[in-house]
């Protein structure tokens, strides 16, 4: 009987996390509950363009501002590599009370012989709640 009681408790005590993705355009902000994320600037985009052989892969660095309940919390720099690898702890924009917002990618990816206007950039975000 004790085993049955334990199993029943275990089945109903597991927390379910939901995840969704969102895009955040350059110069705009997006709200999640009481948290607002603002895409402020692209500080660097030295990622090796498509169809080009580069000695160094490069990286992209963006700046976002985080607001909670309308008040400025902090400025965060996110770093993206062409390999698609992101350091989740460094690219976590907000993490509190079971909610986490993480920067996944910066798009569009550079193309050889063309400069991407800042207004064309957007961040891909993962929202766990």
Image (cartoon, rainbow, N blue to C red):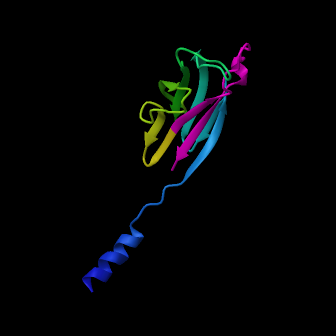
Q: Position of residue 109 (x, y in %)?
A: 66, 26
Q: Nearer the viewer, residue 93 or 51?
A: 51
> Can you tell which quarter of the image residue 41 is in?
top right
18 falls in the magenta region: no
Residue at left 61%, top 39%?
Answer: 31
Q: Nearer the viewer, residue 1 or 50?
A: 50
Q: Is residue 69 visible?
A: no
Query: What is the residue that sits farthest to the left in this orientation?
Result: 2
> Can you tell which quarter of the image residue 35 is in?
top right
Task: Identify the magenta region.
Answer: 102-129
Query: What is the residue that sits farthest to the front in this orientation?
Result: 53
The total number of labels drawn is 0
118 falls in the magenta region: yes
Q: Is residue 127 visible?
A: yes
Query: What is the residue that sits farthest to the bottom in this orientation?
Result: 1
Q: Quadrant of the N terminus?
A: bottom left
> Can you tell which quarter of the image residue 6 is in?
bottom left
Residue at left 47%, top 60%?
Answer: 16
Q: Position of residue 102 (x, y in %)?
A: 51, 37
Residue at left 63%, top 36%?
Answer: 30
Task: Look at the picture and state if 129 lies above or below 124.
Answer: below
Residue 111 falls left or right of residue 124: right
Q: Position of residue 27 (x, y in %)?
A: 67, 23
Q: Position of residue 61 (x, y in %)?
A: 54, 20
Q: Nearer the viewer, residue 96 or 119?
A: 119
């Amino acid at each position: 009987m004790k085993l049955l009681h334990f199993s029943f408790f275990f089945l109903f005590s597991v927390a379910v996390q939901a995840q969704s993705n969102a895009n955040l355009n350059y110069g705009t902000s997006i709200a999640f509950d009481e948290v607002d994320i603002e895409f402020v600037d692209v500080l660097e985009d030295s990622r090796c363009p498509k169809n080009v052989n580069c000695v160094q892969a490069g990286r992209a660095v963006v700046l976002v501002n985080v607001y909670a309940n309308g008040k400025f919390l902090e400025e965060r720099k996110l770093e993206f590599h062409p390999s698609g690898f992101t350091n989740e702890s460094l690219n976590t924009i907000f993490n509190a009370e079971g909610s986490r917002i993480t920067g996944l990618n910066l798009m569009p990816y550079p193309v050889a012989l063309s400069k991407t206007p800042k207004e064309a950039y957007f961040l891909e975000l993962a929202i766990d709640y």
